[in-house]
Amino acid sequence: MNATSHWAYGDQAALLTNADLVHTGLGYGTHHMAAVLWACLFEYCRNRNEDHRPSAVLRDALIASATAAVIDYTITPHRFTPGWELVLSKRSMAAGYLAMAGGFVAAEYVLPNRQSGKNFLPKDPRHKEPGLTASPLKDMVASVYPTAGQSKASEPIRLGKHRHAYPS
């Protein structure tokens, strides 16, 4: 994880073998955010595809993982690469990206509601499904907070410890 912090501390960060908050913490945080980014790409691929066969899931996982590898090591400037190239062989780096694809496939089958289509990201709004608005962000917020932006006239809105306002 220390090598991933090379964007802030230079390539010498990869030489550190002890865990510390400065290098390891930043490396973990950076790695985690990148993993979430690539997981969102996988979710996007899955939400655009109604095919739940294992071959389709594997295809989408490999697309997301290969895209991550290509972008990480061809388009991205050296300073902002994952840093794996500083401590791992190319074969080990490839194994890491294959493991990422494996994690995507596992998530498809292990997490609840995946096969039923109740994913974390909303479906593509161009697919005409009942109850889907044109705003994916609004759909996502509504799925997490079903009453967001709605209040009952008789229900006070809490403004502070003892102050209330009633919706008009």
Image (cartoon, rainbow, N blue to C red):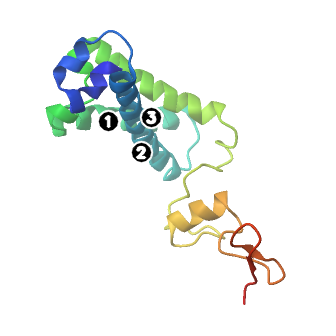
Q: Which badge, 2 or 3, comes first in the chain's sequence? A: 2
Nearer the observer, 38 or 52: 38
User: From the viewer's perspective, is 69 left or right of 46?
Assistant: left
- If the image is split into quadrants, where does the C terminus sit? bottom right
- If the image is split into quadrants, where does the N terminus sit? top left
Q: Nearer the viewer, mark 3 or mark 1?
A: 1
Q: Residue at x 65, y 35 (%)?
A: 111
User: From the viewer's perspective, is 89 left or right of 63?
Assistant: left
Q: Which mark is residue 41?
A: 2
Q: Which mark is residue 108?
A: none
Q: Which residue is mark 1?
A: 68
| Residues marked 2 and 1 touching at CB (< 8 Å) | yes
> In x, y percent, where is residue 114?
64, 42
Q: Which badge, 2 or 1, comes first in the chain's sequence? A: 2
Please state which amino acid type lies under the numbered disc 2: Leu
Q: Nearer the viewer, mark 2 or mark 3?
A: 2
